[in-house]
Image: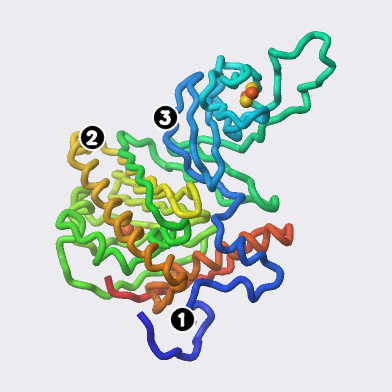
Amino acid sequence: MTGAPRPARNPLTAPVTSLPRPAEDAALDPEAMRQPLGNAWYCVGQSRSLGRTGLRAVELNGEQIVLGRAPDGIPFALRDRCPHRGMALSKGRFDGDTLMCPFHGWRFGTDGRCRDVPTLSEHDAADFSRIQVQRFPVCESAGFLWVNPRLGPAAGPVAAVPELDFKPAGSLVVELVVEASYDLTTLSLVDPGHVAFVHDSWWFRPSKQLREKVKTFQPVPHGFVMTSHATTTSSPVYRLLGGVPEVEIEFRLPGVRLERIRAGEKRVANYTFATPLTPDRTLLTNALYWSMPALNLLKPIAWPLMRQFLTQDQQVLQHAQDGLDRKPTMVLFGQGDLPSQWYFRLKREALESARAGRAFVNPLEQRELRWRS
Ligand code: FES
Ligand SMILES: [Fe+2]
């Protein structure tokens, strides 16, 4: 959408006629703003996908990473590249103590240090103890593995990994690769305007009418939250819970959307994570958790619906990416697009604070937004 430029009323409502231009800020590397944040936690798959002594290769922000789990259950993440001739270590074996490269048998500890070069003669003075594979921080939370690729400058605390604040009786996970950039995909997590047009399935949105929405947003560490409200939606999904559910939706860097639904004692959480694989491929992971054992019966029905929902995003994002590839500008317009502008402000602050070696200061303020959806 385009229109005559209007005077800016407030920095948050100023129409943006192109992608944010960090080039104007001499202090910040303009390229950095176009990349996913280097120092942040990204979801790299379900915890249960990583068994004891098994290895798994994952892609993250252009890096190839091998994940494994030590016998004590603690996961580790190493660059999936043997320093000798570049072989993928994930193709080798892990005996619970060392990973063995399948090319010439070099062995590495879970800390990445070379432990053995079996082809070395006893009379060879070469010292392998200084050879090392890069190790990445890894942790587990909410049933997922999280890796911080730690590229770029070190910084203060980064956004926490998402946790679940109730014990789920069941969960469903859908993962889908989107052929689109990290920023474009992540914007869909904070974009209320697309829901009525993209997610118009009968089971999610039976009404085709656009309705006026008024919601209060406030800053939270590394993000913002649409504060808990009694939902007015006619969605059968919400009706399943009975009563009038309260919904709270949080966004936090780098690309995490946490929807928490509460109806009395009943709890449902719908978490969505964006993970950059390469500059033009992004993984979307959607995890639905519930506290009511009876809902486990609905799993066979819910899984295809959830997949359909994510596929709707996937399709539209891929077409939009084609358009952005031809001309990489966006018009972020009106209050419904403010959360998208906030995403770029949060990202910029993460980069600037890291560059200056200071703490992240959330640049957002509490604010009421109005839009139709
Ligand atoms: S490439 Fe790994 S041991 Fe040679
Ligand atoms: Fe969507």
Q: Nearer the viewer, mark 2 or mark 1?
A: 1
The mark nearer the N terminus, 2 or 1, is 1
Which quarter of the picture shows residue 335?
Answer: bottom left
* Rendered residue at 49%/82% (across/down): 14
Ligand 2 is in which quadrant of the figure? Answer: bottom left
| Residue that label 3 marks | 49
Mark 1, other Cα within 10 Å: few <14 / some 14–19 / many ≥20: many
The amino acid at mark 3 is Ser
CA separation in Å, label 2 and label 1: 45 Å
User: Which label was assigned to residue 296?
Assistant: 2
Task: Kindly identify the amino acid type of the residue bearing the numbered disc 1.
Answer: Pro
Q: What residue do we see at 83% from left, 10% from top?
A: 123
SS at circle 2? helix
Front-lying residue, 245 or 15: 15
Residue 246 seen by the camera: no
Q: Residues within 10 Å of mark 3 (few under 14, many from 20)?
A: few
